[in-house]
């Protein structure tokens, strides 16, 4: 299992707005449900979506966390 930094594990608020086309948390959650994307909510109602789930669903590749020579 590869390590993903916590700040990259979840989609950002901006990414969720772009993905759903919605601004309000409740509307975002409804849109995510219609899209069949599993999500949870934080105590404030903000949707929490794992980046890995979206990448797999949309056919993207997982970002590589491996160190490469000459790369900072």
Image: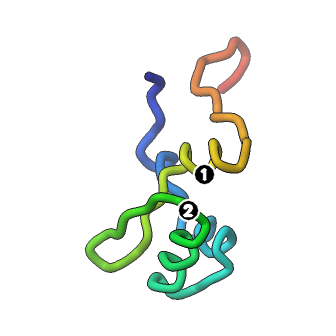
Q: Where is residue 36 in the image (x, y as percent from the top left)?
A: 56, 62
Element assignment for label 2: loop
Residues under numbered marks 2 and 1 in contact, where contact means CB atoms less than 8 Å apart: no
User: What's the residue at 40%, 75% (across, down)?
Assistant: 46
| Front one among 53 and 17 | 53
Q: Where is residue 33 in the image (x, y as percent from the top left)?
A: 51, 70
Q: In this view, does 51 lie to the left or right of 61?
A: left
Q: How many badges with numbers are in the image?
A: 2
The reply, left or right, for residue 65 in relation to residue 70 is left
Q: Report the residue that reaches farthest toward the top.
A: 69
Residue marked by disc 1: 54
Query: Which residue occupies the extreme left position in the image?
Result: 43
Q: In which quarter of the image is the N terminus?
A: top left
Q: Where is residue 23 in the image (x, y as percent from the top left)?
A: 58, 85
Please tell me whether residue 51 is drawn above or below residue 16 in the rendered image. Answer: above
Query: Which of the two marks, 2 or 1, is nearer to us in this view?
Result: 2
Reading the image, the residue beneath label 2 is 36
Q: Is mark 1 on a helix, strand or loop?
A: helix
């Amino acid at each position: 299992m590869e390590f993903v930094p916590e700040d990259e594990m979840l989609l950002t608020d901006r990414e969720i707005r772009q993905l759903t086309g919605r601004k309000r948390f409740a509307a975002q959650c409804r849109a995510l449900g219609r899209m069949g994307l599993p999500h949870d909510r934080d105590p404030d109602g903000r949707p929490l979506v794992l980046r890995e789930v979206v990448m797999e669903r949309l056919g993207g590749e997982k970002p590589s966390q491996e160190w490469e020579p000459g790369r900072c």
